[in-house]
Amino acid sequence: MYTFAEENYIKAIFKIAEREQNSVGTNAISSVMKTSAASVSDMLRKLSDKELIHYEKYKGVTLTTTGSKLATQLIRKHRLWEVFLVDKLKFRWDQVHDIAEELEHINSDELIRRLDVFLGSPKFDPHGDPIPNAQGKFTLRNQVTLTDLQIEQQGVLVGVKEHTTPFLEYLNDLKIGLGTHMKVVKINAFDESFTIIINQSQKHNISKKTAANLQVKVVK
């Protein structure tokens, strides 16, 4: 049995490693966990003692097989709960992250098995992130960010990289969500912002930062 704090650290290390494709430094963990480097070092020693990570001071952190399995289980539970909250309880996609952060710590394999069956074994969560199956395998798909599209190219939104409430609320205001059709009509030379048409009707100007956080499947 692990504490909530230990589980949160393991999940954070997994996500940082996934993004950076490398061993994880204490500064990166400190930034994500919003705590001091000293607190991070103390936790890393505990996780190492429990054989969840390989940790050598100044050389970064990697997850052990046990640690990686724990991380994918937490991610699976978190994303299944998000699907449940959005699809069954009708929460908006900008409302579910913090609730799922609490629910993911419920330690019942049978509950999660039944939840998965009840939801029809979804492959992606409401933000478009892949849900690992019971064996920890993620579903892959062809997708690019909106910044990869050229003028006149089109795509359908299949995911968002940024999950913060302000960002998702901003997309709500623009009426952009999963399944939204987007066409790039202009890339502005001055600030590299994108002018797009959504669902073949509304025109919006969005920043390059926003575009970089929109994952799309290219359509002809």
Image: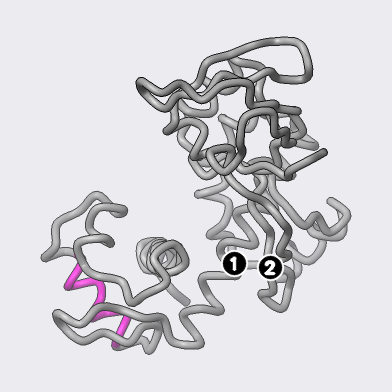
Q: Earlier in the sequence, mark 2 or mark 1?
A: 1
Q: Please give the name of the residue rendered at 73% of the width and 69% of the height, measured from the top-left corner.
A: 133
Find numbered disc 2 in the image and state the secondary structure of the residue it sits on: loop
Q: Within the image, what quadrant is residue 175 found in?
A: top right
Q: What residue span does the magenta drawing correspond to? A: 40-48
Is 90 in front, or is 162? 162
Q: Residue 73 in the image: x percent, y percent?
A: 60, 69
- Name which residue type carries label 1: Asn
Mark 1 = which residue? 107
- Which residue is at 38% across, 89% downward? 51
Is residue 78 inside the magenta stretch? Answer: no
Where's residue 77, x and y in %? 63, 59
- The mark lying in front, picked from 2 and 1, is 2
Q: Residues within 10 Å of mark 1 (few under 14, many from 20)?
A: few
- For the residue marked with disc 2, what is the amino acid? Phe
- At x 57%, y 30%, the residue is 95
Q: Secondary structure at mark 1?
A: loop
* Number of marks in the rendered image: 2
Task: Look at the image and tell me in which quarter the C terminus lies.
Answer: top right
Q: Are marks 2 and 1 in contact (CB under 8 Å)?
A: no
- Between the residue at mark 2 and the residue at mark 1, the CA separation in whole angstroms equals 21 Å
Tell me the crowding category of disc 2: few under 14, some 14 to 19, or many 20 or more residues within 10 angstroms, Cα based: some
Q: Residue furthest left?
A: 38
Question: What secondary structure is the stretch in magenta mostly built from?
Answer: helix
- Quickly name the residue at label 2: 138
42 is within the stretch colored magenta = yes
Q: Position of residue 166 (x, y in %)?
A: 45, 25
